[in-house]
Image: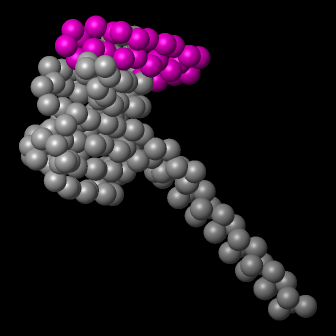
């Protein structure tokens, strides 16, 4: 009888320890890096050179956050993934560009400038998606900024810097 109670006590203590360990592990992620911090890590991999053609933030079910960047530089295209909590480089892929700086050839506005313009238009917030597209002969920067519960989507004309399309959703 004493042995059975001892086994039950040890099993219960082990369950509590495991539960506390899992809870603590889930809370120890730390602080989420800002978009700009993750972008700086990605750009540093390329020696600071290159133009962001697309970026996204991927929220995994596990709670992991991954910043994804597509960057063009000289004759190469890069795909870089950065862990949103640790800043670790999860993926770094380089391949020769199909066309000489396809999306970014002749850009007037760089990604950082456009993102700052978008944050100002939205009244603050965080960039969660960015992409450069060619549309009817124009280069358009498509960008999404989230400020609290509000999602701002906009398109900025590269030639004029004008916001040509804007929507806001709460």
Q: Is residue 74 above or below residue 91?
A: above
**Left or right position of 12 against 20:** right
At a point 79% along the width and 85% down the height, the residue shown is: 6
At a point 71% along the width and 71% down the height, the residue shown is: 15
**Most foreground residue, 61 or 7:** 61
Residue 149 counted in the magenta span: yes
Return the residue found at the far right.
1
Locate the C terminus and report the quarter of the image it occupies. top right
Locate the N terminus and report the quarter of the image it occupies. bottom right
> Residue 7 at x, y = what percent?
78, 85
At a point 30% along the width and 43% down the height, the residue shown is: 69
**Left or right position of 7 against 60:** right
> Residue 2 at x, y = what percent?
86, 89
**Most foreground residue, 7 or 167:** 167
Q: Is residue 115 above or below residue 74?
A: above
Secondary structure that dominates the magenta span: strand
**Left or right position of 6 against 119:** right
At a point 19% along the width and 37% down the height, the residue shown is: 102
Give the residues in magenta.
Answer: 145-170
Visible residue check, residue 148? yes
> Residue 70 at x, y = what percent?
28, 43
> Residue 129 at x, y = what percent?
39, 31
Q: How many marks?
A: 0
Classify residue 153 by image quadrant: top left
Residue 113 counted in the magenta span: no
Visible residue check, residue 30? no
């Amino acid at each position: 009888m004493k042995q059975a109670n001892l086994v039950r006590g040890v099993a219960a203590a082990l369950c509590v320890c495991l539960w506390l360990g899992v809870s603590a592990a889930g809370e120890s992620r730390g602080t989420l890096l800002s978009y700009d911090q993750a972008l700086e890590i990605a750009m540093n991999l390329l020696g600071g050179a290159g133009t962001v053609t697309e970026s996204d933030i991927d929220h995994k079910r596990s709670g992991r956050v991954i910043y994804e960047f597509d960057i063009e530089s000289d004759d190469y295209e890069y795909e870089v993934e950065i862990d949103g909590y640790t800043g670790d480089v999860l993926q770094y892929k380089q391949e020769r560009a199909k066309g000489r700086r396809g999306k970014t050839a002749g850009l007037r506005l760089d990604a950082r400038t456009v993102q700052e313009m978008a944050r100002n238009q939205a009244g603050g917030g965080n960039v969660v998606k960015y992409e450069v597209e060619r549309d009817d002969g124009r280069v358009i920067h498509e960008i999404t900024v989230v400020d609290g519960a509000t999602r701002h989507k906009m398109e900025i004309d590269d030639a004029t810097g004008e916001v040509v399309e804007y929507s806001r959703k709460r």
